Image (cartoon, rainbow, N blue to C red):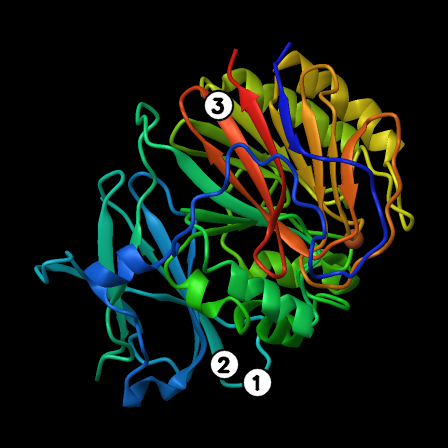
């Protein structure tokens, strides 16, 4: 059984959607600082050059591991598109020719390109610029590879769900994402409202988060709204996700001492529970975090707990002592008490409005609020901070490793 310290909390109440009114006993205040400044100080900001007006979707980092990374972008009429790699001190490391894909595309001459980079070292900053056979398309910027499994560095990430239709709230929350440090970004599904079209991905995902995506890897789960177009096909085309038997629908990856497993709650639960059981069996990481869209525990007015999901998933989570489960779908924040050793958090207030939330016997704290969560996993404890659209931390959670 895990020991869990709840900070903040108190009774639930109705209030404005952006600002928290509750300032609890936050004994582990979130560290403040930019997630991208350190990388940009070493490599640059990646501004587009004059020739770069052919870049219609800014570069974004995918599948970053200890030894590899994939950079995606969209360009018109590609001609030898490539990533030009250097060290932070400017020493050349070579060029990686991009693979061109024909779809999905909003305009007929737009092409998806992927530069897949291998042979890297763990926990190391690499600088990259975009180019084609003729000219540089961008100034250099950079990324950091994942730390090794033996690293004792803290692993920091943000998570949010239900983010996107370009609302003011989405943009205000996005601005707050520049105020706390982290190394990777997690999305809990429903990225591209209303129906996961390529235009909605361009306008409500890539355009909104371009400055973060350029320097930080993004590992999303798909939600029901993504499935309204081509059964989630656009989602799987615009993201390069770790391959495996889930075929980009469900997958897992490691970041330092943390094993992440991602499910697709639009697909069969039993199949994925069996996969997750095998996946967690193989993991030797001391921390396991599982995330997906539909919540097994929720007091939301719109959806509530997904009981069939809970029934098949909870025994697997309990068996493998998964410390934290993150979900979205209901547009609020909710943290449960530990349920057989696992804490479940709904973080569905990523920008697409909020809805009322009640309290259940499993609820430790719930709030109707636009927010994201920042999680820092150290050697001995995991600390989660919930941060609202004005930047105020309104709840936190500490899970010691036992
Ligand atoms: Fe949803």
Horizontal side of residue 302 vs 334, given as left or right: right
Q: Cα distance, mark 1 to mark 2?
A: 5 Å
Classify the position of the N terminus by image quarter. top right
- Give the labeled residue for mark 2: 110
Q: Is residue 242 visible?
A: no
Circle 2 sits in a helix, a strand or a loop, which is it? strand
Q: Residues within 10 Å of mark 2 (few under 14, many from 20)?
A: many
- Decide which of tag 1 and tag 3 comes sooner along the chain: 1
> 328 or 31, which lies in front?
31
Q: Is residue 297 left or right of residue 23?
A: right
In the image, which is nearer the foreground, mark 1 or mark 3?
Answer: 3
Quarter of the figure with residue 80: bottom left
Tag 1–tag 2 contact (CB < 8 Å): yes
The residue carrying mark 1 is 107
Where residue 370 sits: x, y (%)? 70, 57
At horizontal 38% and vertical 56% (from top left) the residue drawn is 34
Residue 120 position in % (x across, y down): 23, 44
Name the residue nearer the viewer: 128 or 356: 356
Please, is residue 398 above or below residue 113 in the view? Answer: above
Residue topped by disc 3: 381
Foreground tag (2 vs 3): 3
Q: How crowded is mark 1: few (under 14 residues within 10 Å), some or many (20 or more)?
A: few
223 up-or-down from 50: above or below: above
Q: Would you place residue 123 above or below residue 170 in this image?
A: above
Q: Quadrant of residue 264?
A: top right
Of 49 and 169, nearer the camera is 169
């Amino acid at each position: 059984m895990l020991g869990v310290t709840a900070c903040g909390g108190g009774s639930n109440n109705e209030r404005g959607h952006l600002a928290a009114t509750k300032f609890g006993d936050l004994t582990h205040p979130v560290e403040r600082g930019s997630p991208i400044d350190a990388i940009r100080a070493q490599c640059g900001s990646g501004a587009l050059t004059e020739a770069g007006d052919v870049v219609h979707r800014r570069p974004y980092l995918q599948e970053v591991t200890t030894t590899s990374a994939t950079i995606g972008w969209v360009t018109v009429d590609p001609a030898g598109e490539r990533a030009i790699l250097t060290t932070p001190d400017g020493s050349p490391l070579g060029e990686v020719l991009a693979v061109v894909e024909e779809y999905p595309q909003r305009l007929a001459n737009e092409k998806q390109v992927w530069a897949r980079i291998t042979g890297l070292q763990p926990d190391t900053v690499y600088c990259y610029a975009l180019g084609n056979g003729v000219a540089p398309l961008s100034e250099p910027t950079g990324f950091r590879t994942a730390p090794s499994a033996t690293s004792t560095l803290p692993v920091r990430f943000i998570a949010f769900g239900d983010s996107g239709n370009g609302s003011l709230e989405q943009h205000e929350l996005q601005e707050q994402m520049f105020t706390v440090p982290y190394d990777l970004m997690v999305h809990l599904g429903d990225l591209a409202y209303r129906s996961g079209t390529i235009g909605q991905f361009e306008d409500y995902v890539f355009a909104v988060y371009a400055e973060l995506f350029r320097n930080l890897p993004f590992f999303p789960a798909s939600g029901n709204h993504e499935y309204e177009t081509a059964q989630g096909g656009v989602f799987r085309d615009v993201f390069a996700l770790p391959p495996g038997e889930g075929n980009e629908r469900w997958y897992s990856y490691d970041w330092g001492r943390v094993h992440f497993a991602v499910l697709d709650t639009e697909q069969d639960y039993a199949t994925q529970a069996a996969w997750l059981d095998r996946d967690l069996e193989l993991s030797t990481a001391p921390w396991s975090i599982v995330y997906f869209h539909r919540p097994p525990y929720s007091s939301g007015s719109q959806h509530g707990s997904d009981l069939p999901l809970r029934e098949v998933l909870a025994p697997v989570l309990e068996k493998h002592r998964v410390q934290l489960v993150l979900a979205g779908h209901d547009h609020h924040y909710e943290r449960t008490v530990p349920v057989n050793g696992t804490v479940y958090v709904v973080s569905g207030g990523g920008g697409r409005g909020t809805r009322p939330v009640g309290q259940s016997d499993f609820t430790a704290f719930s709030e109707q609020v636009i927010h994201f969560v920042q999680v820092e996993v150290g050697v001995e404890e995991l600390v989660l901070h919930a941060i609202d659209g004005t930047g105020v931390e309104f709840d936190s959670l500490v899970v010691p490793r036992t």
